[in-house]
Image (tube, rainbow, N blue to C red):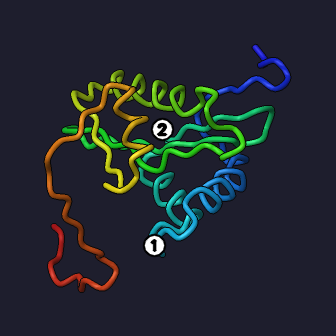
Amino acid sequence: MTPAVGAVDVRRYVPSDEEGVVALWTEVFDGDPAWNEPRAMLRRKLASDPTLVFVAVIGSRVIGAVLGGYDGVRGWVYHLAVLPTERRRGTATRLMHVLEAALTELGCPKLNLQVRATNESVIGFYRALGYEVEERTSLGKRLEHVPVTTRVV
């Protein structure tokens, strides 16, 4: 069934969505660190698991996107974004519901996400969807300069 003109359709990513997703993330996540360069991040995700990438489109125009991950223990939400001109219409909520359903089908028992502590409006959005702030410390390590000294057998 084809969506009505102007209607938002949420579906799995297809290769022709690449330019739209890259443009979306470039606009929405302006100032992100270099390791989050949109095209490279999208391609890494697609190479490891293309099934948990969803887009919101009007016709063929990408207006929203989200990446999900599942490692068999927990699910993760990465880079949920909707164009500023298209916000407050339920698109981000629909993207999250589609991702949650896909992860549930995979047997995922818990979904996590990280948000900058200063981003109160986004925290409010996730709270409205039933997410709770969990007291944790997030640790990270960049691996591009770590030498590979142990052979994996």
Residue drawn 22% across the image and 27% down it: 109
Residue drawn 25% across the image and 83% down it: 146
**Which quadrant: the N terminus?**
top right
In this view, 86 is above or below 47: above
**Which quadrant: the C terminus?**
bottom left
The residue beneath circle 1 is 33
In this view, 29 is above or below 3: below
The image quadrant of residue 54 is: top right
Q: Which mark is residue 98?
A: none
In this view, 135 is above or below 32: above
Residue drawn 18% across the image and 69% down it: 152
Q: Nearer the viewer, residue 98 or 151?
A: 98
Residue 140 lies left or right of residue 11; in this view the side is left
Picture coordinates of residue 94, whole percent (x, y): 54, 26
Picture coordinates of residue 61, whole percent (x, y): 77, 41
In this view, 82 is above or below 107: below
- Specify which label sits upstream in the sequence, 1 or 2: 1
Q: Nearer the viewer, residue 23 or 147?
A: 23
Picture coordinates of residue 26, whole percent (x, y): 62, 62
Give the SS element for disc 1.
loop
Tag 1: amino acid:
Pro
Picture coordinates of residue 51, whole percent (x, y): 48, 38
Give the SS element for disc 2.
helix
The residue beneath circle 2 is 51
Residue 151 lies left or right of residue 85; in this view the side is left
